[in-house]
Amino acid sequence: MSRPESKISSVTLANSEIAALPLCYTPTTMSPSFWRYMKYARPYWHVCLASIIFGMFKFSLALLLPGALGLVVRNVVEAQLTPEEQIQKLVLILSALIVAFLLRAPITYYRTYFAELAGNRTIFDIRTDLYRHIQRLSMAYHANRRTGSTISRLINDINAAQGILDRGVITLLIDFLFLLGVVALLFSLDWRLACASLVTLPLYCSAIIVLNPRMRESAKDVQDQVSEMSGEVTEKLAGLSVVLSFVREKTEEIEFFKRHRVYLSKVMIKTRIQATHMSATEFLTAAGPLVVIGYGGFRVVHDTLAIEQLIWFYGFISHLYLPTRRLADSSTLVQERLAAMDRVFEVFDEVPDIADARGAKRLKNPEGQIEFRNVSFGYDPETPVLHDISFTIQPGESVAFVGRSGAGKSTLVNLVPRFYETNSGEIRVDDTNINTLQIKSLRENIGMVLQDSVLFSGPIRDNILYGKRNATETEMLNAASMAHVDEFVDELPDLYDTVIGERGVKLSGGQKQRISIARAFLRDPRILILDEATSSLDSHAENIIQEALTELMEGRTTLVIAHRLSTIVGCDRVIVLEDGRIVQSGTHDSLIQIEGPYRALCEEQFGYIRLEHLDENPA
């Protein structure tokens, strides 16, 4: 798919630059990932061009040394000159070499700087767009993939792709252009010796064409294995308390060893291909100078080639095969890096299954009415979780969804902010199908407080402000006060600037939940979703949280999910779910009076007690 729109434009390199790639690099040997990568490099074509120009200057200066040596032989040693004239000629040649030597340092600096600038900016753009794209993918995509694997593609694979432009393509272009210049120079000196010295070049190209696809495939296998390991380690570290409590450290070490051993075997396969590639290159590039010495020496002996021409040829031939070796190195690097880019673009190719419809409208100042019309849904369409769900919630009404685990309660409320798309039926807010609304505007009017409070490493202040980034200090403090956050923050030395650690590890469950509620207060949504917001708390913490939630629910359309039925006794209405179907609906008082699923759940939790006293029992 095409990359998401962004302020950072990204299109292809100029055709003239792409055309300058080595002959071994044809469109048939380059994958689609290469051309997609080059689209991101296009905004920096002028920086690439500057690096190429400086690179050509740098390597052209390297030709001065063998050229000067030949001039010394012809114009100083063999020429009929007086000693003074010879010294003058020698000083002139040496002065030119010194100037070239002094210029080499700044030229090398700018060649490297411009190449790295273009490469790093390209990687920056790709990673920025990938992160944006990952956030656009639905919850269904993330539910089917390990978090560690996604992180690996965003961090490891893009890091592995570093160098495609600066140490790959730009170096290839410089070496190829330099190679053409050296070949032209050799033919201008002696075409027969030039032909002889190039006899191994076709074999070199053949080696690249044969080995590069294998190199690419093996490199991708390595990256796949790194991703698997990242996913495994991320999952196990996140659940380290479970591993330790069940004394499974040794088992996990063995599992990691097995996976790591597979990784090692993949790396060694890649290493063997690399070694074959480099040894073939070394052999073929070393053969050229031998041909020059043998054939050139034979012609010097027979007076068909001047000695200074042989010296020039031998000096220049080393600069023919040096870029040839670098071409091999660069081609290997590009193939390895493209294997990583293949994995990156696989994520780009995931089409978001939840996106704004054409002409989607903003949800402005909603009253908060919610209606489900014959909604069915399944994570796998062949296995529905919800069946033909229909109900209406009036603005400001609080409705509790009750049922046993697996009845579909959380799935149902997750359809309201369009975390998932319905398989059939429709959901309407203020009599407007949510599929016709802008997703951003829909979610801006929904607040969620979940059982597992999702907090981010950083200060308490930033976690509260996550609900409304442009809130004032006064608004933030008011929200914290209404959620009773100030009661424990006042005891902390750094107050709201206290860093809470990853996922709020330094706070208790009740403290984390209060911050989540403060975030919802600050957002001030018209629609509120409470999903098991107090189920994991002790009685004292629950009483504090329940008081905050009651205030938060005031005047808002609220969908409540709770296993503790006492939490939802005060709701305006109760909807009971069984196996993804609505089996009862009514007020708590009406449903408790009749035999049915709701009364059975109450009896299971509270025991066979006098129904009129049910409201008085604690959770």
Image: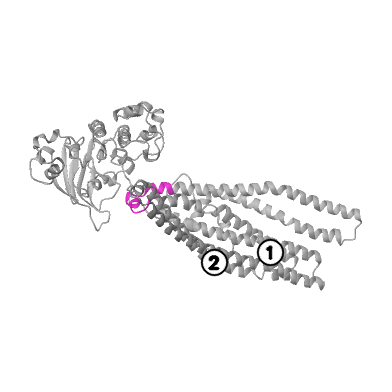
Quadrant in the picture for residue 585: top left
Quadrant in the picture for residue 289: bottom right
Q: Is residue 33 above or below residue 371?
A: below
Q: Magenta segment range?
A: 130-147
Q: Amino acid at mark 2?
A: Leu
Left-right relation of 566 to 510 = left
Q: Quadrant of the N terminus?
A: bottom left
Q: Is residue 619 above or below residue 231?
A: above
Count neighbours of disc 1 (C-alpha within 10 A) and say few if under 14, some if 14 to 19, many if 20 or more.
many
Residue 23 visible in the snapshot: no
Q: Which residue is tagged 2?
A: 211
Chief SS of the magenta region: helix
Q: Amino acid at mark 1?
A: Val
Where residue 81 appears, as percent x and y from the top left, is 90, 58
Q: Secondary structure at mark 1?
A: helix
Residue at 37% x, 40% y is: 503
Was residue 174 drawn as part of the magenta stretch in this picture?
A: no
Where residue 73 appears, as percent x and y from the top left, is 83, 61
Where residue 519 appears, as percent x and y from the top left, is 33, 34
- Count of marks overlaid on the render: 2
Residue at 38% x, 51% y is: 249
Q: Which residue is tagged 1?
A: 183
Residue 87 visible in the snapshot: yes
Alpha carbon of mark 2 to alpha carbon of mark 1: how far? 25 Å
Left-right relation of 128 to 601 = right
**Mark 2 or 1, nearer chain start:** 1
Where residue 380 appears, as percent x and y from the top left, is 27, 56
Was residue 142 drawn as part of the magenta stretch in this picture?
A: yes
Left-right relation of 612 to 281 = left
